[in-house]
Every structure is written in structure tokens, then in C-alpha cells.
Image (tube, grey):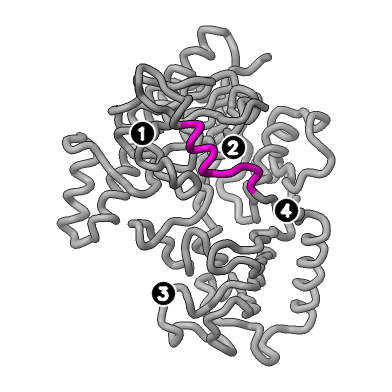
Amino acid sequence: GAYHRAIVGKWDLGAASPKYVPTARGFDAFTGFYNAMIDYFDWTIESVAMTDIAGTILDAQRNDGPSPKAAGQYTTRFLRDAALGEVAAAKTAGKALFLYAAWNAIHYDVAIPDAHALGQPVYMKAVGLGLPQERALALAALRIVDAANEWIYSRLDRDNTIWIQTSDNGGEPHKGASNYPLRGGKGSGWQGGTQVPCFMWLGANLRGSLKSYEGLVHVTDWVPTLIGGALGAPEALPDDLYGQDLWESLRGNSEKKREDILLLATAGTGDDAGEAMVSLRTDRYKVLIGQAPCAVGTPSSEYAGCDCSADRTTVWVSDLLEDPSESTNLNCGDALPADVRADLADRLAKNWDMHVQPAQRPCYDETRAATFIEAECSYDDVQYYCPWLAA
């Protein structure tokens, strides 16, 4: 094809079978790890999904096999070098490049090299300012990621590059992140769990007149925006995508905007098994159903709700323009205009009917998978994570 397609870093989209790994899903090259998170130095799995082998099995991968050179290498530095290698590979092949870099940092538990020229000064300054150690480590690790991005950017054909930088969720406040002034964090239904910073940089041959975009953008919009808009190939896209092509809007050439986003639709797990959590927002209002408002580590007196139940029965409605911290529940008495209430209910029902599918249950036994990996997946007497289903 015209593009060299590479991924470095976190996959976390399933690797039970060889048919699910990146090189079987459209990528030409992969350097990274299959699971959600790994140790920053020894590359062992740190994952709640594979607790039977966490901390003992390496998850260092190169294409469809283990990457023995990774162990002992600081993840950000190793992945940076892999990304630079993919930039060079595309140039050698005379191809354009699609590079997806999903860093291990700053996923917890955060670590930095002892004598890193960039990370250590940031860490020491943060500690000197009185910040908690976890916050200081997160800031330092992120500075190292910034430097890695600078290295990659310096090797690109910048006049013809689209650079998108974003996150998959809000940070964990108790792990060193800050979502201020947004309420909540990763895993919650509040804005602190779902609204993240993002920037899109367009090279000189691609950019339009727009400097900033205030409309709604959902993660699913990137596929139609890049393939349908930037590449001009909408015929390659399925008809039933949730995402929307916002290419011309992001360049300032169109007034098209998203009207709403279905943020959450989950049945809950663990102690909340069977309890639904549903959330939808428009450009101004947001409805959140099933998030316990008084079980988020904040005194209830700081929030104005018509109740303060610790269960997940509350329907919370916020005006995000006037109240971005979601401190006041408008679903109390007659605080919410009837037409807004009706509009939110209608949008929620339509999105649910059109886009929510029955819950998918695990199709494998975790203990059986761990037993197979421990017995069968090794390289030079070192155990690595590997697919354990034949098909």
C-alpha cells in the first residue's frame, strides 16, 4: 500500500488469538505490549485483567513475537527509538507513514530513570514545591514523553503531516494526575473521566484558517475524519459508524458540528455488577445516570444535589457552560427547563437504541490462559505473554 502503518506502545485491544494482534489487524509493524500496562523497566505485566501472571510474565512484543531487547530498557526511551525506526522505514520504502504511538507513560505505577537529564530536574523541582511524590513522578515521566514526541516530530515531513495528540481518558487523581477544574477521574462518569485535552497540528500544505475548535469531538470521529476527510476516501468506511467526519470543520471550512456524544453505556462490574451507568452530553448539557454522587471521595456539602445517595440511582444533569465542575444537579425540582429535559431524554433513547449493543462476556478462562502462557510462551528461557488460542 501507499502507507507504512506502524504502532508503538500499548495495544490493549485483545491478543487471545494471533488473528487479533496488530500485524493481523492492518499494521505492518508493531513494537510494544499487548496488555493495558507494564512495568516501566522490566516490561512485566501490571494488569488487573491477567492477575494470575501479573509481575512475572514479560509483555514485550515485536510484530508477532517477543522482543527480547526490550527488557531492562525504560519503556518511553525504547518506544521512542522504535518509533524513529518506523519513520526511517517509511522513508526507505518511499511510502507515507501512519504512526500510532501509545506510550506506557504516564500510566501508573509511574517510574523514571534515576539520572534522566530531563525527568529528574522536573521531579526534584516538583518535590521542592511540595507536590506529592506520585504527582512529581507523573510530571517527570510526562516530560520524558514530551521529549520523545519532539524527537519523532523532528524526523517528519512536517509540511505534509497531521499530528494528533490526545488521551483515552481522564487521569487518576490518587495516582498523581489532575483533572482540575473537572470533577471526578478515570473510570467515573464525570467530566474528569471523559473530557481530555487534545490538539491537532496540520502541516503547511494541509492547514486551513482555524486556530481552535470549540465543538464536540469524540474518539470515534478520528477514523472518518482521517480516512473520509483527510484522505478523501469515504467509500472505504462502513455505513454504520458512530464517528463523524469533522475534517473540514477542524480546518475552519465547514459549520458542521456534533450535536451530542454518548459518553458511557455500561452495566457495571465488581461491586456495581448489574448497575447501569449511562451518560450523554450536548454542547451545553449533560445527563449522567448511575454515578453515585457521594461516593467519589469529596464531601457531599460541596455538591448541590436533591439527594446524596451513595447508591447508583441518581440522575444528575449539569449545565457544562455555567457549571463545568458539575457541582449542581439541575434535575432537582423545576431547575431544568422542560424542553431541555425532553430533549436530553429523546437523545438518550435514540443513542441507546442505535448504538448500544448487548454486553460482551469474556470468552476464555483467565486461569487456563495463564497456565498456557506459563507453560508454552518462552524465549531463551524467559517467559513472555503470547496468544493462547489457536484461532
Crowding around mark 3 (Cα neighbors within 10 Å: few <14, some 14 to 19, many 20+) is few
**Picture residue at 40% right of the left edge, 47% below the top:** 107
**Picture residue at 35% right of the left edge, 41% below the top:** 55
**Picture residue at 57% right of the left edge, 8% below the top:** 94
The amino acid sitting under disc 4 is: Lys
Mark 1 and 2 residues: CB-CB less than 8 Å, in contact? no
Mark 3 and 4 residues: CB-CB less than 8 Å, in contact? no
Q: Using residue 40 as the reference point, say whether residue 316 is left or right of it.
A: right
Residue range of the region highlighted in magenta in the rendering = 362-373
Front tag of 4 and 2: 2
Crowding around mark 2 (Cα neighbors within 10 Å: few <14, some 14 to 19, many 20+) is some
The amino acid sitting under disc 1 is: Trp
**Picture residue at 75% right of the left edge, 72% below the top:** 344
Of the two numbered discs 2 and 3 on the same chain, state the one appearing first in sequence. 2
Q: Total marks drawn?
A: 4
Residue 242: percent from left, percent from top: 75, 48
Q: Is residue 158 above or below residue 261?
A: above
Crowding around mark 1 (Cα neighbors within 10 Å: few <14, some 14 to 19, many 20+) is many
Of the two numbered discs 4 and 2 on the same chain, state the one appearing first in sequence. 2
SS for dot 4: loop
Label 3 and label 1: CA atoms lie apart by 32 Å
Q: Which residue is mark 4?
A: 257
Q: Which residue is mark 3?
A: 297
Front tag of 4 and 1: 1
Q: Which residue is mark 1?
A: 43
Q: Using residue 247 as the reference point, say whether residue 328 is left or right of it.
A: left
Q: Which residue is mark 2?
A: 14
